Image: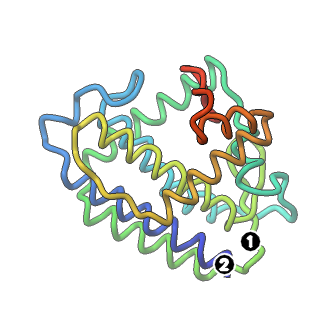
Amino acid sequence: MERMQNVVLFEESARSFFGLLARINPDQWDEPGLGAWTVRSLAGHTLRAITTVGEYLAVEPPSVASCADAEAYLLGITAGAGVNDAIAQRGIASGELLAAIPLEQLTQELNRTLAQIAAQPVARVLAVHGGRSILLSEYLRTRSFELIVHSMDIARATGIEQVLPMRSVEDAAALAARVAVRQGDGKAILNALTGRIPLPESFSVV
């Protein structure tokens, strides 16, 4: 049941993202998106939350998962100039690819990925970037998280009003909160959510 729920959240988040892409005006694609990214690069980076699932499913699965869950996966993401530069470049490259692919084709690719997922055993493990491994079901939670957070970024950058799938927002918010707790910021999160003390301006769980 949990695997099916995570698949549904992933699909809802992906289709909501595609709906947002369809509403971006042609003259907005090269406007500032997030950090060094334009809207196009940001959208390209977000698209990778979908395409990497199919890429990883095509690789021979490891026997065990090194990441216990989505929270552990996000906690294990390492930052740094080299890592951030590589992520930025992949986003730019994916954005250029996005410009050449009709949205209908992207939707077809999502449908193929969903069919791949449905054909996997319940305990399917993925070998993912950075030499780590994780259950497919938990990896999908991280992809939904990426899709929701970056859809919000794109909507903010373009001024588009978007109604996000509530279940996916709920899971993304809960995932972020649990990551914060695990990294020792549980009290800070509780204080902020209950109106006691605001979070520091630079606070982030990713």
Name the residue beneath numbered marker 2. Answer: 120
The answer to which image quadrant residue 126 occupies is: bottom right
Task: Label 2, secondary structure: give it.
Answer: loop
Tell me if label 1 and label 2 are in contact, CB under 8 Å: yes
For the C terminus, the quadrant is: top right
Which residue occupies the foreground of this view, 121 or 173? 173
- Mark 1–mark 2 Cα distance, whole angstroms, equals 6 Å
User: Which amino acid type is marked by label 1?
Assistant: Arg
Q: Position of residue 77 (x, y in %)?
A: 70, 36
Q: Position of residue 145 (x, y in %)?
A: 54, 52
* Placement of 171 over or under 128, stated as above or below: below
Is 139 positioned to the left or the right of 114 in the image? right
Q: Are there few (<14), some (14-19), or many (20+) residues within 10 Å of tag 2?
A: few
Q: In percent of the image, x 67 and y 26: which residue is there?
A: 79
Q: Position of residue 34 (x, y in %)?
A: 39, 28
Is 71 positioned to the left or the right of 164 in the image? right
Task: Label 1, secondary structure: give it.
Answer: loop
* Placement of 130 over or under 188, stated as above or below: below
Name the residue beneath numbered marker 1. Answer: 124
Colour scheme employed for the rendering of this structure: rainbow
Is 140 positioned to the left or the right of 179 in the image? left
Which residue occupies the foreground of this view, 174 or 130? 174
Is 20 positioned to the left or the right of 193 in the image? left
Q: In percent of the image, x 67 and y 67: which residue is there?
A: 137
User: Which amino acid type is marked by label 2?
Assistant: Gln
Q: Are there few (<14), some (14-19), or many (20+) residues within 10 Å of tag 1?
A: some
Q: Residue 161 got which mark?
A: none
Q: In percent of the image, x 54 and y 20: which residue is there?
A: 201
Q: Position of residue 83 (x, y in %)?
A: 63, 26
* Placement of 138 over or under 195, stated as above or below: below
Q: In percent of the image, x 81 and y 52: which residue is there?
A: 67
